[in-house]
Amino acid sequence: MTFTEFRPLDEKHLTEYIKATPALSGKVGNSFDDLKIKEVGDGNLNFVYIVVSPAGSLVIKQALPYVRCIGESWPMTKERAYFEALALREHGRLCPENVPEVYHFDRTMSLIGMRYLEPPHIILRKGLIAGIEYPLLAEHISSYMAKTLYHTSLLYRTTTEHKRDVAEFCGNVELCRLTEQVVFSDPYKASQYNRWTSPYLDRDAEAVREDNILKLEVAELKSKFCERAQALVHGDLHTGSVMVTHESTQVIDPEFAFYGPMGFDIGAFIGNLILAFYAQDGHADQGNDRKTYKEWILRTIKETWNLFYKKFTALWDEHKDGSGEAYLPGIYNNPELRQLVQKKFMQDLFHDTLGFGAAKMIRRLVGVAHVEDFESITDSSKRAKCERQALDLAKMLLKERRKFQSIDEVLSSILQQQ
Amino acid sequence: MTFTEFRPLDEKHLTEYIKATPALSGKVGNSFDDLKIKEVGDGNLNFVYIVVSPAGSLVIKQALPYVRCIGESWPMTKERAYFEALALREHGRLCPENVPEVYHFDRTMSLIGMRYLEPPHIILRKGLIAGIEYPLLAEHISSYMAKTLYHTSLLYRTTTEHKRDVAEFCGNVELCRLTEQVVFSDPYKASQYNRWTSPYLDRDAEAVREDNILKLEVAELKSKFCERAQALVHGDLHTGSVMVTHESTQVIDPEFAFYGPMGFDIGAFIGNLILAFYAQDGHADQGNDRKTYKEWILRTIKETWNLFYKKFTALWDEHKDGSGEAYLPGIYNNPELRQLVQKKFMQDLFHDTLGFGAAKMIRRLVGVAHVEDFESITDSSKRAKCERQALDLAKMLLKERRKFQSIDEVLSSILQQQ
């Protein structure tokens, strides 16, 4: 079955579609009698169907031409599915261990057929709320970030490859605009979409809108987001875009992918871990005070950055004689200079990471889209207390990020505040 | 006459071409008997014909598929003519007073028909060598830079417009690569193309290739050049890309145009004025010690930056309620905050300007393409002395640029060194 124009698929038509598409029907063993289809899209933007047969399984993700949770009043190009498929394939090529395989993409239908991440895979955010430790998380996510960011940057690529791909991803402009609005703009002004735990945080939200230094800093980050084509970033790498088991870490949903600053991805992940940390007091009960778990989160934050640092610079060393145009071997291949250059690069990236991470935290506390980590704390006074701590840390990080030399200093700030 | 494929035009075919092209033949009053054609391309990359009839005139510029001064051994896409025409039209729309009008563009032939800048227009660099003052130069060039850079940045444009144009100019990648090589790479390594006033500057050139701090700083500038799509820059705004009379200032040759950092243009212009300053001692003779002229150059450098600052921030103020996405009115429209934001923006831009300006100076002293300011000093010992002063200042500026708060401080450094 080929559609010549877009239509949202219901379950019945989905079966027809799979039957008619060899790359998909093969995945369920070409047997359609026992096909089980379940719609599970809990995101804001798409339909997601899980399709399971006795012979195999797959996921079908279809983009809709509007923001699903708000409705047709907020239109959103379904072309984002094209960029999601492109990024899944590119990141999957670079890091197949941590990115689900794409079986099929249909641009007309804005439809991706891909690997079903079978149970016990769950969304990392849900695992963090449940207090589950993932011993390999930092190891895996740092590999994913190091491999995808290094290999799509000018550290590894030629200018020709870089500009070609930058141009292509300029097409994902509507999703970039959405990020600009909800991350870098709305939280800092009166907006119909903003919300917060009222009345507790009324004054805190107002303070964000009146903080000139904060606005000065967020403007610098926004311009980096808009102007700096450093690497192919996932663009939305929070803990809801990662599925995990104890052994597996899989990064999904790169529909916001574009050539942007590396720190936007690393910051998104670390910022959301910090949010998870601050939410723990709201999840503590008599059976579990979450103290040990909070320590695990902090350890994971630390390891994520430190392992990323190690792996990223190891890739750099490994390819020092390669065709990357940023640091030509003829100029930079002396060990002392390379160390100097790497130290400066990683320090700048660390400061970007803290800045973007903090901005991503703030927007989840006083902007349009909140996180389940806090939303699931039903006592709103308790929730507000957790949220205020997170907000205060984020504001400080955004303003003072250049003073931090290491991730340990960030953790100390978090602990001092407790 | 329509060509279906590229061919370099000689004078005979040029007449045929003009006859067959109404947008061009009209400019010479459709009279071809008294047509005078002169080839004047003294640049490195193109044929340039001046075409004059009793009824009017025009210039035909045709890009060749290689670097002309080196020959067919250094291929260079003739598609650059497309980006030159695009930039001339865009910059011309924004600043018609200082950009020659484009009459015609033929992509197949890589051919631009444009206004002939009639005598007494001369290349600014030649005027600077001759010791001629241009009282309106700073006024004009600051307008050109403020208008073109402001209006093509996110201060004025929407993200949608910005990403569309960034993607388009990603196509000019070969010219960007040439700049990367000759400005940011070759001077810092052994390269067959590098030259300098030998033997006098042998040790100085070697010192550039061995200076780790210089290489660290130039790497940061290179990554800004490659990654930061801040505005549609001319890309080669030295004093050889400007034609002048006492009343007129015209910016030509934007074939290197792309979306890059604003400071690359401002730095190119100011850096080349500083080169002109240091060359003056080599042009001094008994009739003219060039002392007054050197003061005029310094004054022009100062006014160029200060007027640029004034005009750029005035455009910003004027359009503060416009559709530019960088600083939304809802967040930044309070006079105190706007002032804070502008001060920071302009300070960062000033440091970029000094860095790029210094890099452009260095490459003209120890890289492949030198400037006539120095080349015309026949006494090589005297030339080397001038060049060494310029080189020392440029190295200091590149390394220490962040310490400078105003253009006056830069001028003081220049004067202290004298």
Image (cartoon, coloured by chain):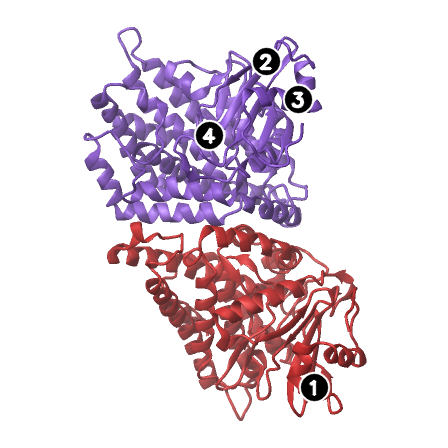
Chain colours: A purple, B red
- Say what amino acid the circle numbered 3 marks: Leu
Q: Is residue A172 visible?
A: yes
Residue for point 72% across, 84% down? B38
Q: What residue did someone put label 2 on?
A: A52
Judged from this view, the residue extending furthest toward the top is A287
Q: Please rate how many residues cluster around mark 4, counting C-alpha atoms within 10 Å: few if below 14, some from 14 to 19, many from 20.
A: many
Against A142, is A188 above or below? below
Q: Nearer the viewer, residue A44 or B162?
A: A44
Is the Cβ of the residue at disc 3 closer than 8 Å to that at disc 2? no
Judge from the rendering whether residue B144 lies leftward or rightward of residue B201; answer left or right: left
Counting from the top left corner in percent of width and height, residue A196 is at 27, 32
The CA distance from mark 1 to mark 3 is 66 Å
- All told, the count of numbered labels is 4
Q: Nearer the viewer, residue B183 or B161?
A: B161
Counting from the top left corner in percent of width and height, residue B48 is at 70, 77
Q: What residue did someone put label 3 on?
A: A24
The CA distance from mark 3 to mark 4 is 38 Å
- Which circle's residue, 3 or 4, is located before the other in the chain? 3
Q: Please rate how many residues cluster around mark 2, counting C-alpha atoms within 10 Å: few if below 14, some from 14 to 19, many from 20.
A: many
